[in-house]
Amino acid sequence: MSLRHLSLDELDAEGVEAVLRADQASALAETKLVDVQRFGGDAYRLTPNGRVGAVRFEDVQIEVRPKQKLGVAHLVFLLGYAKDPGFRPESVAAEAFDDLWPAMAHSLVASVEGALTRGLLQGYRTEQEALLTVRGRIAFEEQIRRRPGVGVPIEVRYDDFSSDIAENQILLAAIHLMLSVPRVPSEARRRLLHLAAKFSGVSRLPPGTVLPGWHPSRLNGRYHAALGLADILLSHGSTRVTSAGVEMSAFVVVMWKVFEDFVTRALTEALGDCRGYVRPQFPAYLTGEGNWTMGMTGKGSDDPHGDVAMTIDLVHLDDSSTPRVVFDAKYKLASTTGEYANADHYQMLAYCTALRVPVAWLVFAGGGADIRRSIKHSDVEVVTAPINLRRSPEQILARIDEIARAALARF
């Protein structure tokens, strides 16, 4: 059975027509990758709705690609860096694949194989058991609660040196998720099965389970790249039987959120060495009589009696806790009729007015040069600063550094 592959650009307002069964259309709608509208019989119109990714079920694959034809490797880099600034794209062997699933499969294989070059990582984990002899420490509170007045078995806690640790459980979960995706290339599937066999003795996490916590260290350093990729796959991917009874694999992300998270994290890192400090997701009010102040908790708070609340992506403050610059990330400008959006400038003016800040940086995905605009009858300046996401990760981060330096140049 051949695969029907439908590909859309995320800005495609026309969408595509597809012939689907009712249960397939219902299952596709559940993923929220596209809007699904029936217009007669088995014919449906699929239109993008702000998300990108790929959904695969039976003989159908629907893919929505980011604007600017952003590659899989770049998308994974943005996702990874937003969660961990140490994430680098070297582990993403995706440039040779246009299809998301083969790209993710080969990337996961390469990164896990690299992590296991010296075998499975082992570590200590705390176990609690009821034994006939003492091992480790007696858990007196558990003994009294479970077996009051009974001598044996004895509730004990001990540290066991094992491969059944969080890092291995996460990698194994990502491998099994990818193995459940239909039509993964045979070579990648063979290598995934070979890798899964190496995790003998590692507990398999049930689908949908919250991932166990782990902490980066020198000991698990060789796992970091693979864990970063596995976390992306497990956070945004799923394989399941839908309520309509269709077996489906999906990898779906909201691009404006991906871009906002990346820019916020990257600017926070770039401004980290500058005097003052930054606050992401900064709460403020457009109305009210009070000025912004720094509370005892170290978190910014505005007049609590304001009734028009705002959350600013990122604010840079000086050492005396006075806001100096605001930043806002826009994946797409609010207006589609002009190069620069009126609504976005209104928003920046509101931020600057509420915080008494002279300049706002509107960071958006696109090409071109920075443009500064002074708002009439005010001291506010709005700078539109594009980031070309088609550039290499190193160039993208260098562009973020350039924006950070320019934003603080006047202070």
Image: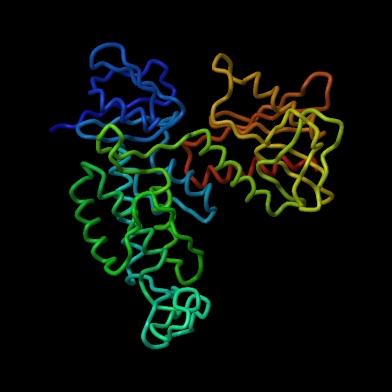
Quadrant where the image shows the C terminus: top right
**Observer-nearest residue: 186 or 294?**
294
**Quadrant of the image occupied by residue 61:** top left
Residue 371, given in percent of the width and then of the height, sits at 67, 27
Residue 203: percent from the left, percent from the top?
Answer: 33, 64
Please tell me which residue is depicted at 53% across the width and 36% down the height of the picture.
257
Instruction: Say above or below: 214 vs 352.
Output: below
Looking at the image, residue 315 lies above or below residue 191: above
Q: Count all numbered tags in the image, as a single digit.
A: 0
**Residue at (44%, 80%) from the top-left corner?**
156
Q: Which residue is drawn at 33% across and 17% down?
A: 45
Residue furthest bottom in the image:
133
Nearer-the-camera pick, 163 or 245 = 245
How far across and down, in percent of the image, does residue 52 sit? 41, 33
- Dividing the picture into quadrants, the one containing residue 360 is top right
Work out whether 17 lies above or below 32. above
Q: Which of 367 and 324 is in front in this view?
A: 324
Check the image and name the residue furthest to the top: 40
Which quarter of the image is occupied by the N terminus? Answer: top left
Give the colour scheme shown: rainbow
Q: Left or right of 247: which side holds 138? A: right
